[in-house]
């Protein structure tokens, strides 16, 4: 019997957004097919064994710090398909060159105690902003998922004013300790993609403070999330095909009616949803299907200004930070900001990134996932993840010639903070350059975080005001990837919001609580 060829919705791409969207629509009773070009579903949700078998490294998406705002795991019953999160007690640390460390905890009281050791005034400011931002969170998270997306400037006078400023301006106004300012800037950069001087993102400072205790990792590795969602799609009667590249979006009489796959097979649907970037999507549909002015504007969508050089280590022993001599909790933190200890350090880093230089600045996001989830390493051993902030393209140099040397540099630099990261302790190491990542995850061409999270590309104006509603000028064609509102580091919010639009357009059941 020939396999059927007609669905309600065809989803292009099985990353976090595509997998989430498919599950929402299946629960609405729609017939859904997800098409993924890679060997395996998941996109950025990747856990792999590139160092030594048995050491599972999260090579893409790792930080989940908005689980409290985006209830997809509850609404999709993901616990039933073995998805759970680890929420470490010690959340974040900024170890300093002088041996001290600022430490952030799940428990606000403990965070305030740590901030107080740097500045009593800053602890009071932290508490004030935490209270103000937390009070607005229900409204804020509702706005993330609202349809059509609305600009959601914070309501309260103070936060509304901050939203017009850059993070640096806010931090310089509100805080005095460089360590406190720097730690917040680390949190803004990863995973929000916000740099210290992006205007109009000042309220993210309050957002980062309210969410500072919310960092979580997926138990058994990020890919477990993809695996569970994949299982849920099949259990709900959906279809999902890996190693299936969409080479064309079929448009008939101006309407998207289906897709063509590599090899020529055609599939038809009432709606086609692309989770790849807008320019790539319109290329698949054929550029003649939309007005040239729109294509020009889409082509001007600004990519992320930075990328990451990632290093993964298989370790014999867990990390022993120098700063643990002052506060032993440092060894237990979920995430570390390493190297940038003042606003001036951030400024210097961005100077290097923007001029395309291989950074001499240490500017790292570091984590040791197996400390929190032993299942991610061979029993008794550990994994390390190092993300150094770098330019996407190097001026006058080729990333492939830098891979080995820069990996050694990154490890050496981290060793200054973690002395037991010795050669004897490191059993295996591997690195990915920005080019390696784009080769693997093709739609990262616009950036790891879906395109710059700044200026006119923020929130409800993302990627362009006329596309921000998830519909495109081609009826039947929708967008739901990381280039869509609400923006970087907030996936799968684009999928959840797009589900709202599709429920309206396809007259399907809206079973979820009003977001
Ligand atoms: C190193 C790294 C670290 C990151 N860390 C974080 C983090 O900590 N927190 C965070 O929130 N975000 C993080 N991100 C970003 C995050 O991975 C993305 O925002 C997220 O994956 C977006 O999900 P998505 O489904 O939109 O896209 P993707 O995960 O990129 O999935 C899109 C899928 O579409 C597939 N595809 C592309 N073209 C086609 C085609 N023609 N036919 C069929 N399939 C196609 C791709 O193969 C891919 O699987 C990180 C990214 C990287 C690379």
Image: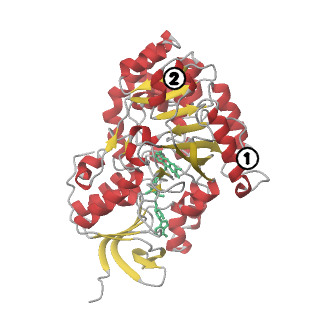
Quadrant containing the N terminus is: bottom left
Residue 83 rendering spot, x and y as whole percentages: 30, 50
Can residue 64 be seen by looking at this rendering? yes
- Few, some or many C-alpha atoms within 10 Å of disc 2 (few <14, some 14-19, many ≥20)? some
- Few, some or many C-alpha atoms within 10 Å of disc 1 (few <14, some 14-19, many ≥20)? some
- Residue 390 lies left or right of residue 510; in this view the side is right
Q: Nearer the viewer, mark 1 or mark 2?
A: 2
Question: From this viewpoint, which residue is outermost toward the front?
Answer: 424
Residue depicted at x 62% and y 37%: 422
Sequence-wise, which precedes: disc 1 or disc 2? 2
Quarter of the image holding residue 100?
Answer: top right
Seen in the picture, residue 511 relative to 271 is either above or below; the reply is above
Does dot 2 land on a helix, a strand or a loop? helix
Question: From this viewpoint, which residue is outermost toward the top?
Answer: 120
Residue depicted at x 53% and y 57%: 50
- Residue 477 lies left or right of residue 1; in this view the side is right
Residue depicted at x 40% and y 38%: 372
Query: In this orientation, which residue lies closer to the viewer: 341 or 326?
Result: 326
Query: In this orientation, which residue lies closer to the viewer: 309 or 187?
Result: 309
Query: In this orientation, which residue lies closer to the viewer: 503 or 266?
Result: 266
Check disc 1 and report the residue beneath it: 356
Quarter of the image holding residue 250?
Answer: bottom left
Residue depicted at x 43% and y 54%: 45
Does dot 1 land on a helix, a strand or a loop? loop
Seen in the picture, residue 383 relative to 257 is either above or below; the reply is above
Residue 481 rendering spot, x and y as whole percentages: 45, 57
Q: CA distance from mark 1 to mark 2?
A: 35 Å
User: Is label 1's Cβ within 8 Å of ligand 1?
Assistant: no
- Residue 290 lies left or right of residue 211; in this view the side is right
Can residue 165 be seen by looking at this rendering? no
Residue 442 rendering spot, x and y as whole percentages: 55, 63
Check disc 2 and report the residue beneath it: 324
């Amino acid at each position: 019997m020939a396999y059927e060829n007609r669905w309600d919705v065809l989803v292009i791409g099985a990353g976090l957004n595509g997998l989430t969207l498919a599950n929402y629509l299946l629960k609405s009773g729609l017939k859904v097919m997800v098409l993924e070009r890679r060997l395996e579903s998941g996109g950025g949700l990747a856990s792999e064994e590139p160092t030594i078998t048995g050491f599972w490294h999260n090579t893409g998406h790792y930080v989940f710090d908005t689980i409290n705002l985006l209830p997809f795991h509850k609404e999709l019953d993901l616990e039933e398909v073995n998805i759970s999160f680890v929420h470490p007690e010690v959340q974040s640390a900024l170890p300093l060159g002088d041996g001290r460390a600022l430490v952030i905890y799940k428990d606000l009281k403990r965070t305030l105690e740590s901030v107080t050791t740097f500045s009593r005034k800053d602890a009071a400011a932290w508490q004030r902003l935490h209270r103000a931002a937390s009070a607005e969170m229900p409204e804020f998270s509702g706005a993330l998922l609202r349809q059509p997306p609305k600009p959601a400037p914070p309501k309260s006078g103070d936060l509304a004013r901050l939203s017009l400023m850059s993070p640096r301006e806010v931090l310089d106004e509100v805080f005095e300790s460089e360590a406190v300012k720097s730690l917040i800037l680390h949190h803004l950069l990863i995973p929000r993609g916000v740099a210290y001087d992006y205007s109009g993102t000042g309220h993210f400072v309050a957002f980062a403070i309210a969410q500072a205790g919310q960092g979580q990792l997926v138990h058994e590795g990020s890919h477990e999330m993809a695996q569970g969602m994949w299982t849920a799609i099949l259990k709900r009667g959906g279809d999902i095909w890996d190693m299936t590249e969409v080479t064309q979006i079929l448009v008939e009489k101006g309407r998207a009616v289906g897709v063509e796959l590599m090899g020529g097979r055609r599939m038809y649907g009432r709606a086609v949803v692309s989770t790849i970037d807008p320019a790539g999507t319109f290329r698949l549909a054929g550029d003649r299907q939309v007005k040239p002015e729109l294509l020009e504007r889409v082509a001007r969508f600004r990519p992320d200004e930075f990328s990451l050089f990632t290093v993964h280590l298989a370790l014999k022993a867990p990390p022993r930070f120098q700063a643990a001599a002052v506060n032993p909790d440092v060894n237990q933190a979920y995430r570390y900001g390493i190297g940038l200890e003042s606003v001036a350090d951030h400024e210097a880093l961005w100077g290097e990134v923007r001029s395309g230089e291989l950074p001499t600045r240490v500017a790292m996001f570091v984590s040791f996932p197996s400390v929190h989830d032993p299942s991610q390493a061979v029993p008794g051993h550990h994994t390390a993840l190092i993300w150094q902030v770098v330019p996407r393209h190097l001026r006058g140099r080729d990333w492939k010639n830098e891979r080995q040397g820069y990996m050694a540099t990154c490890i050496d630099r981290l060793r200054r903070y973690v002395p037991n990261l010795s050669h004897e302790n490191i059993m295996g190491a591997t690195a990915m350059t920005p080019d390696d990542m784009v080769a693997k995850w093709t739609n990262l061409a616009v950036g790891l975080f879906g395109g710059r999270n700044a200026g006119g590309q923020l929130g409800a104006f993302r990627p362009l005001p006329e596309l921000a509603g998830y519909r495109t000028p081609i009826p039947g064609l929708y967008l739901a990837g990381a280039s869509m509102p609400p923006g970087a580091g907030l996936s799968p919010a684009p999928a959840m919001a797009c589900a709202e639009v599709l429920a309206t357009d396809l007259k399907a059941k809206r079973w979820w609580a009003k977001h």
